[in-house]
Image (cartoon, helix red, strand yellow):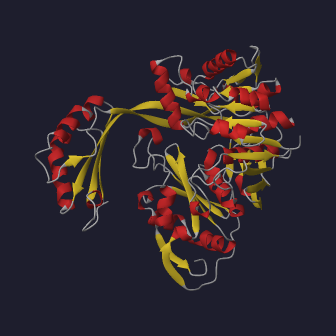
Amino acid sequence: MTVLRIGNASGFYGDRFDALREMLTGGDLDVLTGDYLAELTMLILARDRLKDPAAGYARTFPRQLEDTLGLAHERGVRIVTNAGGLNPAGLAGAVRELAGRLGIPVRIAHVEGDDLTAAHPGSLAAHAYLGGFGIAAALRAGADIVVTGRVTDAALVTGPAAAHFGWGPADHDRLAGAVVAGHVLECGTQATGGNYAFFRDGDARRPGFPLAEIGPDGSSVVTKHPGTGGFVDVGTVTAQLLYETGGARYAGPDVTARLDTVRLTQEGPDRVRIDGARGEAPPPALKVGVNRLGGFRNEVTFVLTGLDIEAKAALVREQMAGALAESPPAEAHWELVRTDRPDAPTEETASALLRLVVRDPGQETVGRPLTAAAVELALASYPGFHVLAPPEKGSPYGVFEDVYVPQGAVDHVAVLYDGRRITVAPPQDTRALHPVGEPPLPEPLPPGPTRRAPLGLVLGARSGDKGGDANVGVWARTEEGWRWLAHTLTTGLFRHLLPETAGLTVVRHALPNLRALNFVVEGILGAGAASRARFDPQAKALGEWLRSRHLDIPEALL
């Protein structure tokens, strides 16, 4: 077989439940993957495990297999998933029990060694991001289903590709191509029109899930099953390539992929070829995601309707000041959101929102005092007083941090369906990361007439979280647009357009092959998405905010 067809049926824990069946019945596949894990998901699963030591995995996965396991077996489709979360052995056992009950003779293996929680006292969960060679070992030994814990998202693709084509750790360029394909597939329908800046280019109501046809040289074609919704074009693939990445070097445990070498070509309707990816030896250290309990938070949103919005907001703040001073939380943040408009046709559009968010190590500090003070204002504050929901007693929030350990510090093991254990050796060849120099930029556009307009008319963007940092990938759809973008959107202008980033470190990375700039904003998310320190805690809409900002744009582009 010259091409390996790998599909995806899940981009997160909670994704479309029937996607597994859709992918198995919609067309030919060799391997079907499911990505269930994110930094926030690991915290959720850790809290599940505190209540039940047998928990810690994505409980939806066995339910999805109830009526699809036989179908996968009949069609010879292997399944690889990180739904094992904090307890891959537990999920493998649950799937084994399900297969026995259904009478389906499938061989189930799992990968372990990522759990380093015991080495990080005080953490709820600490897990290393493993590569794909544990998955490859299990598949080479005949596994039909491979369950993992924390691996890199792309490992769900690099593992099957390495097993199928016989790649080894030194096949850096081939592995890099599979990493790029895996990164495009990992978030499911984000590659087929979901969350896409130019979603009106096609039918984005119910995008189909993506698949990649991977060749023996690591190149691939990203597509989807015939007749499914959404669309695949150079823009949708570019957007996903930029998502949650940084500079030209995209490091992982198996290989460092050079994103600045990747070429995208529209090969036909819903078919985008990815080639040119070059790889380098992986870094000598493994990333470990550590989740800790950060403290407790509470929130109350006051609704201010009609006239005197600013004065009403000032009154509430004065009335709440006593309670906040009597038992001061570590953090208290007020935000007046002006969603109101004059002479509004509905009460909701006549109303603004005043949000108070408090956080503290102690639950009592953010619980009863805040709740009582807000409730007591019900008949004693501004006219029209009400809140969106009663404040709570204070809910826990998590803190995420990256730490690094040597590649050889983990016991990466594939546990086969018959109980045999295969140890996966760390890579012998490693290379420390260092920044790539600024690439040559195209000639700027010649001067010409401009018009004030939103950036999003000519530029696409996609943003996301990277621990406490966020990235905003911005790309142009034409070569002329790239010539303008490359010389216009500096870090200074970026900070000006997004004032919330003004006091933060912003690093710009240019990727000319993709006609794209990738901005990394350090620290904007505080201690990570689980800490819920920001209105948009995962920076999902940061790129859309940028696209909404107005700038003098060359009329030739408009």
Image spot of residue 291 (x, y percent): 49, 31
Q: In this view, does 300 lie to the left or right of 231?
A: left
Quarter holding the N terminus is top right
Q: Is residue 282 something that shows in the picture?
A: no
Name the residue at 28% across, 53% down.
353
Q: Which of 103 and 61 is in front in this view?
A: 103
Examine the rendered structure and indicate whether residue 252 appears above or below residue 196: above
Image quarter of residue 321 = top left
Q: In which quarter of the image is the C terminus?
A: bottom right
Return the x and y of residue 250 as percentages of the image width and height: 67, 47
Choose between 399 and 219: the one closer to the eye. Answer: 219
Residue 165 image-quadrant placement: top right
In-image side of 26 versus 319 (left or right): right
Q: Where is residue 145 in the image (x, y as percent from the top left)?
A: 72, 26
Give the residue at the far right of this rendering.
1
Q: Is residue 272 left or right of residue 81?
A: right
Name the quadrant containing residue 198: bottom right
Report x, y in % for residue 430: 75, 38
Give whichever of 26, 94 is nearer the camera: 26
Q: In this view, does 554 lie above or below 95?
A: below
- Residue that appears at 55% across and 22% down: 119
Can residue 316 be seen at all in this image of the molecule? yes
* Residue at the image point whose x is 81% and y is 24% from the top: 142
